[in-house]
Structure formats: structure tokens, C-alpha cells
Image (tube, helix red, strand yellow):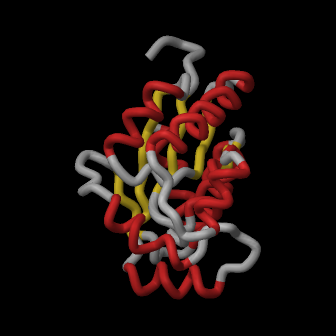
Amino acid sequence: MASGETRLLVVMGPSGAGKSTVGVLAARRLGVPFYEGDAYHSAENVELIGAGIPLTMKERRPWIAAIGEAVGEDAPELGVLACSALNHEIRSVMEELIPAALTFAVLDVPEAELLERLKERQGHFAGPDLLRSQLDAMDDMDGIERLDGMLPPEELGRKAAELMRS
């Protein structure tokens, strides 16, 4: 990697895994920008997700491109992104459209815990209705850093930040 190239940690997993919480904590620990992937969805995507309808790649590409534009405009040396990135196809498009060297880390959380978290979550457009389709869309995450999503958030934030210090 050339000096000055952006490196981006992508904290990933299905809805309710804790991506945003862990991402914010990791970014704070590293002193770098945090990008909330959900903030870059179009109104149409938010509507679909809110209705429990999974996005297709046709809907995901402009969303990922918007994330890439934000990262490109900021051009940080290092940053953290919270984004589901559930399978290889999505991660490949991210690598194509986000101008950064991406490091992926998935938060492993049991399905029953994800469902409980989503039932309790308020003020977010992605609810429990989308969980099954997200879990079905996930691949084996081969070669992806895995973090135990049941650990306390502060510990997860520390572990995620450590991935970028090496």
C-alpha cells in the first residue's frame, strides 16, 4: 500500500450485530473518522428495508458508491465504516467503488440474540423482519476477521481498533 492511501476498517454483520456501536468505539479509539453505512442509503432503500424487503445489487451499488464518494472526499489516512457487507459479491463491489484498502471484520452474534436486539431497538428503519433474509444472504466469511459479538462493546471496539494498528 502506498503512503497516503486510505485504509478503512469495515465492521460488518447483520442488523442488530452492533456494527455502529463497535465502529464508533473503534474510530474513537483510533482517533479517525467513522462512516455510518446506513446514512448513505437513498430514501427508496430506507423504504424497502423498513418494509422488510431485501435490497438487490441494483439498489446496493448506488449506496456503496455514495459511501465511496464520502470516503474519497474526506481522503482520511484511516477510517472505520459500519456496513452489513454480508457476502462476497457485496464486498467485491465495495472494493471496486470505495477508494480505500478495506479490512473486513464480522461481528459473530447468535441469531436468537440478534432477534432480541432488533425487537428492542427503536428509531431504526431495519427491524426484525429483515433478519432472516440477511442471515440467508451471508456467506461463510472465509478469510474475514471474526469478532465475538457477545463481548462487551468496549472490548469489541478495542479488538476492532487493534486490527488496524498492525
The reply to whether residue 29 is visible in this rendering is no
| Residue nearest the viewer, comparing 103 with 69 | 69
Q: Residue at x 70, y 69 (%)?
A: 124
Across and down, in percent, residue 140 comes to 24, 57
The reply to whether residue 112 is visible in this rendering is yes
Across and down, in percent, residue 137 comes to 34, 59
Q: Quadrant of residue 103?
A: top left
Residue furthest top in the image: 2
Across and down, in percent, residue 163 comes to 45, 45
Q: Is residue 25 left or right of residue 92?
A: right
Q: Residue at x 73, y 26 (%)?
A: 74
Q: Residue at x 52, y 64 (%)?
A: 53
User: Could you tell me which quadrant the N terminus lies in?
Assistant: top left
User: Could you tell me which quadrant the C terminus lies in?
Assistant: top left
Across and down, in percent, residue 152 comes to 55, 75
Q: Residue at x 51, y 77 (%)?
A: 129
